[in-house]
Structure formats: C-alpha cells, structure tokens
Image (tube, rainbow, N blue to C red):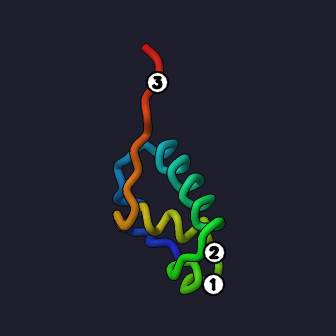
Amino acid sequence: MILPLDLLVADDSNRYELCSAAMRRANQLSLAADEDVEANGGKVVSTAVKQILTRKVRYEIERTGP
C-alpha cells in the first residue's frame, strides 16, 4: 500500500499541521531527486505523507502572534 493507513489513523497530531507539512515536503520532493519517490512511482504527495508518518522526516510549525 502506498499510504500507511494504519499510521494515519493512529496519528494523533493536528491534521492541519500534517497537511501543511506534507504540502511543503511534497514541494521539496518535486524539486529534488529522491529514491523514495522513484520507488513510489513518482507520487510525491503520498511519499511525503508516508515519510512524515513513519518519522523519516520531522517537521516543526512556527507559531506566530501574541
């Protein structure tokens, strides 16, 4: 399976943050050659989500405001 659905269901992080991180990571993957994308048939978004859920890639959301 391309997306690890069991990890997605078990993930208790903020869905908005996960989506934002996945969009940013997908953009990074589309600009650079990555062996995970090649192994996943060129699918950058599902590769980005999988990398985040499996903790291969970490993300941090900067909080702004008061």
- How far from the left and from the top, in percent, is residue 53? 40, 63
Q: Residues within 10 Å of mark 3 (few under 14, many from 20)?
A: few
Marks 2 and 1 sit apart, C-alpha to C-alpha, by: 6 Å
Q: Say what amino acid the circle numbered 3 marks.
A: Thr
Q: Residues within 10 Å of mark 2 (few under 14, many from 20)?
A: some
Residue placed most toward the observer, 50 or 66 = 66
Residue at 52% across, 65% down: 48
Residue placed most toward the observer, 28 or 41 = 28
N-terminal label among 2 and 3: 2
Residue at mark 2: 43
- Check contact, mark 2 vs mark 1: CB within 8 A: yes
Residue placed most toward the observer, 50 or 26 = 26
> From what the image shows, is residue 29 above or below residue 38?
above
- How far from the left and from the top, in percent, is residue 35? 51, 82
N-terminal label among 3 and 1: 1
- Check contact, mark 3 vs mark 1: CB within 8 A: no
Number of the label disc, if any, that sits on residue 64: 3
- How far from the left and from the top, in percent, is residue 63? 43, 29
> From what the image shows, is residue 16 above or below residue 62?
below
Q: Say what amino acid the circle numbered 2 marks.
A: Lys
Residue at mark 1: 41
Residue at 34% across, 63% down: 55
Helix, strand or loop at label 2? It is loop
